[in-house]
Each structure stands twice: as C-alpha cells, then as structure tokens.
Amino acid sequence: MDLHKRKACIAILIAILSKKSVKRKRWVKNWLQRRNDFTHLSLLNEIRNDNEEEDFQYYYRMKEACFDQLLQMVKPYLTKQDTCMRKSISAEEKLAVTLRYLATGRNISDLKYSVIMSPAAISQAIMDTCQALLHVLQSYIKMPASEEEWKDIAREFGERYQFWNCTGALDGKHVQIQKPPHSGSLYYNYKGHFSIVLMALANAKKEFIMIDVGANGRVSDGGVLFYTKFWELYQQGRLFLPEASTLPGTSETFPYVFIGDEAFALGTNLMKPYPQNACNSERKKFNYQLSRARSVIECAFGILRSKFGVFQKNINFEPSKAALIVATCCYLHNYLIKTSPKQYLTSSWNVEKQNGEQLLDLEPTHNRNPPRDAKAIREQFCHYFNNTL
C-alpha cells in the first residue's frame, strides 16, 4: 500500500472513531418521555376515584360532568395518530392542560413541570384546544336575530331591573398582554400597559350575547365600539331591533336601547349616565336605574376574571392568539352558566386573584356634543323613572 492510500485509510478510520465518540443529543428529555408516569392526569384520576368533586372543580373551574361533556365534544378535533417515534398527546391531556392554563394563567415554562409537556407542546395544545372549543361552543354566544329575541332580552331587564326596553348592557375591558415584537406603541394603552380590548354585550342573566375581541389597546375609549361587527350591523340596520313601544304605566313610546357607561357616546339607541357635575335629583334617579341594569356586564366581567386566572396576569401570546384565548373564556363562561349555574356563579374559585392584575376599564369618551334626539330620549327615560316607577 503506497503512502497516499495509507494516509487516506487512516483519515477514514479517525473520522469513524470520532463520529462514534460524539454523544448524540436526545430530541426529547427523559422525564418528558415518561409523561404517563408524572402527568397531572394521574393525580386527577385519583381525585375522580375518590369522588372529590370540590377538588376537581377547583382544579378545572368546572364540575367533572362538564369536563367529560366538553371532552366528548372536542375529542374528534383533538385526537391525533401515534407515530413510530412517539405516542401522541391525548385529547384529554390537551383539554386538561388548556383548562388548567385558563384557570391559573401560569407561565408556560412553569406549567410544563406539572403537565409534563414541553413548552412548545403546551402552547400548541392550548391553541388547538381553544380553536376546538370555539367550534363546538359557537351556539353559546349568539346575538339575537329577530325582533322577538330582542324583546325577550328586554323583558328580562324590565322584570329584574325595571329598565324596560333595554336590549343589553355594553362594556369593554383592556386585557393585558406581553408587548408584541416590533409593535411600537400600537398596543400601548392609556394606563401604560400593552393590551387588547374585549368588547361585550350582556343580557340580564350575565350571559354574553355579543363579544368582539382583539382591537389594539391604543384605542383606549368607547370609540373602539365603532370598529366592531356589532356596530357595523347596527349602522346598516341589520340588528333587527324592535320598533319603539310603550312601557308599563304610560302611553308614551320608547325606543329599544343598549346601556353603557361614560366610555361611550350617547346615541338614540345607546343610553349612558348623566355627568356627575350636571346631576339633579331626577337625573340621579336615572343614573341609579341605569347603573342597576348595567351591573350585569360588570358582574359578567368580574365572574370571568375570578374564574379564569389568565385574566389576572399578562397573556404571554401574540395578540391574535391572546384574542383566541379570551374568546374561549367567554364561551366557556356562557357554557358553564347554562350547564351548572349554581356552581359556576356561586363557587369561590378565585383564590389566585388577590395578587393578579385587573381588567382595565375603557377610558371615558371625551364628550362630543350628543345628538339632540339622543338627549331627548334620555330625558324621556329620566322622566319615566321619576314619575312612573
């Protein structure tokens, strides 16, 4: 063998030995591969077996029966095939980790130790599950599509709060998020936080009948309403609001109206309080009646925040994904009111809220001069509350 061939053989041998000596990096950590041994589902199965319903409710913010029903609904959309490389994450695990994240708002990097999944897998599971939940629960937030449906809502407001012809309580909140990369001040709100806006309309039972989520937090006041699909339908006359009708005890006709706070502009179908510096005793009575009826949307937001800890911290997802998370919580809110109202509306699952951030109010609208007919309608309601109730 000549010298050149010998050198070539030696080089090949060295390369082979060097390759064998390099320790290959594992693509999945050992403890993550043993998910079935350590996962929180093992703990929850023990709770199920011991019939500890209260513990189950605290952990997931819902009864076991609701969890099982949701699982059956989303299972077809979340079940994936196992591969030769690894076992897929089950639909139950995806639903469990998503509900736990919504309940606590815990950081994904911290959550991985209790659910035994990588941060990337947790994030993907949350997104997949939220999309599935929105799909299967889409009928739980439904804006009225006929005059009769609006009248049913108004009837409940009249019977419960003596604010007749009220078709819903309107409000918006800033939901805090992490600063999106390269966004500048786009999501920077008037309180010095980065946020997206949740706009919602509630009925007298504290259920959402309309939500619009995702507007950037820089639009801080009630003007964000003008960018919603709801307002677009209103402007086009496609909300199908009933014609004006008489109220109990009077022959006068009153329009059907939404009610809001100082963040919104007064309109012919949108009532807001009189300014405090322009109030006499009669106007204070109007403000009181409006505040009582409008409390349903504040209660709805308060319940949402206390049950879902994700609202008590910054949501560490990009804005579009944060909007998906917020919408999912709103749909779950309505689902739980309808399926287990006693447990959902009265249970004190809000232990984590004490150190959390608040949902921020919209900034009051810098009052433009309201239309004359809008002011006349407010005066008409004011006179009714003071002389008929």
Image (cartoon, rainbow, N blue to C red):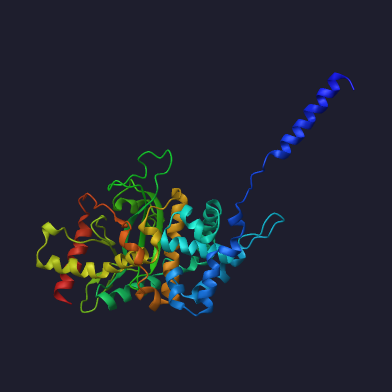
* Nearest the eye: 100 or 360: 100
**Along the line of sight, the residue nearer the viewer: 126 or 247:** 126
Give residue 125's position: percent from left, percent from top: 55, 57
- The residue drawn where x is 45% and y is 48% is 318
Image quadrant where one finds the N terminus: top right
Q: Nearer the viewer, residue 339 or 86?
A: 86
Whether residue 88 sits left or right of residue 379 in the image: it is: right
Residue that extends furthest to the left in the rendered view of this protein? 280
Q: Is 141 located above or below residue 277 in the figure? A: below
Among all residues in the image, which is located at the extreme right? 1
The quarter of the picture where residue 32 lies is bottom right
Front in this rendered view, residue 385 or 3: 3
Whether 255 is drawn above or below 32: the answer is below
Query: Can residue 267 be seen here?
Result: yes
Q: Quadrant of residue 370?
A: bottom left
Residue 234 seen from this side? no
Residue beneath the point at 62% across and 66% down: 76
Q: The C terminus appears in which quarter of the rendering?
A: bottom left
Is 250 positioned to the left or the right of 179 in the image?
left
- Callout count: 0
Name the spot of residue 209 as percent of width and height, x first.
40, 66
Image coordinates of residue 146 in percent, x first then y, are 42, 69
Q: Is residue 6 left or right of residue 245?
A: right
Q: Residue at (22%, 72%) from the top-left corner? A: 252
The residue sitting at the top extreme is: 3
Q: Position of residue 354 (x, y in %)?
A: 31, 62
